[in-house]
Image: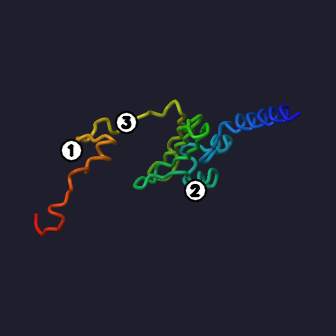
Amino acid sequence: MKISLAKTLIVILAFMMISSCTSIKQSRGYIPDQKMIDAIRVEVDNKESVESMLGNPTMKPTFDDNNWYYYSKETERWAFFKEKTIEMNILAVTFDNDDYVSEIRNFTVADNKIIDPVTKKTITHGKEVNFLAELFGNVGRFGSAGGLPQAGN
């Protein structure tokens, strides 16, 4: 009786551990309604009408108010591993100088370019020190000179 109870508890604990390792999916950003996007007309709608249909943009460039971006992203992560982007959509609305829509573009994960801005390493002057050298590096460097403290170098 005790053996079957122990086996049952082990099976229940194993099932709980396995089921707790499911993926975590998160959606971030603004997901506009496709009907609203299709309702935007080039050279007819202006900034006010786009804002009333889609709301405030996710991002506006600091020095350029003629490009608005609506950004959404869906990610998946397993336990403590790095998250992976499953789906990414960027709706870019460009305005002309008279604040009318001049272009509407959509970008997805396929348009995403991975860049490596830093490919070189900065050379530092010094020596490579391993853990043991760092731990025992000061042994023998400091000693007593006759047992009394002395002034000077």
Q: Quadrant of the C terminus?
A: bottom left
> Helix or strand or loop: what does disc 2 sit on?
helix
Provide the residue designation for mark 3: 116
Q: CA distance from mark 2 to mark 3?
A: 38 Å
Name which of mark 2 and mark 3 comes first in the sequence.
Answer: 2
Q: Residue furthest front?
A: 146
Provide the residue designation for mark 1: 126
Horizontal arrangement in the rendering, residue 15 relative to residue 71 (left or right) = right
Please name the amino acid that badge 2 sits on.
Glu
Horizontal arrangement in the rendering, residue 50 relative to residue 19 (left or right) = left
> Helix or strand or loop: what does disc 1 sit on?
loop
Q: Residue 59 at x, y = what percent?
A: 51, 51
Which residue is painted at 56% across and 46% down in the image? 70
Residue 102 circle label = none
Foreground of the two, 12 or 56: 12
Please name the amino acid that badge 1 sits on.
Gly
Mark 1: few/some/many CA within 10 Å (<14, 14-19, 20+): few
Q: Residue 13 at x, y = what percent?
A: 75, 37
Q: CA distance from mark 1 to mark 2?
A: 59 Å
State the count of labels.
Answer: 3
Q: Residue 38 at x, y = what percent?
A: 64, 40
Foreground of the two, 13 or 90: 13
* 145 lies above or below 113: below
Residue 48 circle label = 2
Q: Residue furthest top?
A: 110
Question: Within the image, what quadrant is residue 73 found in?
Answer: top right
Q: Quadrant of the N terminus?
A: top right
Q: Residue furthest right?
A: 1
Name which of mark 1 and mark 3 comes first in the sequence.
Answer: 3
Name which of mark 1 and mark 2 comes first in the sequence.
Answer: 2
